[in-house]
Amino acid sequence: MNIKLNYSISTDEFLEMVESVGWKTYSKEQVETALKNTIYMVKASVDGKLAGIGRVVGDNSIVCMLTDICVKPEFQGHGIGLKITLELKKYIERVLIIWMNNN
């Protein structure tokens, strides 16, 4: 399985993902605001098909939280969620290293 990561998520992709896993549906305006205020985001695709997403939210200094990590049911069990999580974790570790080097 060829998993490709991308670092942007559109409003429609976000809505498609959360609906595919049965999460609460949000308005487009809510999602646009959420994505605009996202520190870092990852989208996983398999053979050009949207498979999963994840985001980091916070203040980019002290608080960084993983959120909205989800994988479409047909792609679950192939390590996509883990790959997204590890990519988000790498970002947070970089933020912490920069903060520690500056303090």
Image (tube, rainbow, N blue to C red):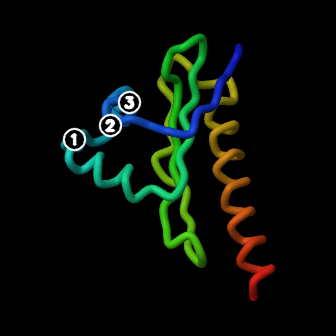
Q: Residue at x 63, y 40 (%)?
A: 84
Gap in angstroms between the C-alphas marked 1 and 2: 7 Å
Residue at numbered disc 1: 28
Q: Secondary structure at mark 3?
A: helix
Q: Quadrant of residue 96?
A: bottom right
| View extreme (front): residue | 102
Q: Which of the pair 21/46 is nearer the observer? A: 46
State if disc 2 and disc 1 touch (CB < 8 Å): yes
x, y (%) of residue 52?
52, 31
Q: Secondary structure at mark 1?
A: helix
The total of numbered circles placed on residues is: 3
Residue flagged by tag 1: what amino acid is it?
A: Lys
**Residue at the top extreme, as displayed:** 47
Quarter of the figure with the C terminus = bottom right
> Counting residues from the N terminus, which is met first, the one under dot 3 or under dot 1?
3
Residue 83 disc label: none
Q: Position of residue 74 (x, y in %)?
A: 51, 16
Q: Nearer the viewer, residue 20 or 84?
A: 84
Spot occupied by residue 89 in the image (x, y as percentages of width and height): 69, 54
The kind of residue tagged 2 is: Thr
- Other-residue count near label 2 (Cα within 10 Å), few / some / many at <14 / 14–19 / ≥20: some
Q: Residue at x 37, y 53 (%)?
A: 36
Side of 80 where 10 appears, left or right: left
Q: Which residue is denoted by mark 3 in the rendering?
A: 13
Quadrant occupied by the N terminus: top right
Which picture quadrant has residue 21? Answer: top left
- Residue on which disc 2 sits: 11
Alpha-carbon distance for marks 3 and 1? 11 Å
- Residue in the image at 51% along x and 49% along y: 55
> What is the three-letter code of the residue carrying label 3?
Glu
Q: Vertical placement of 3 versus 56: above or below?
A: above
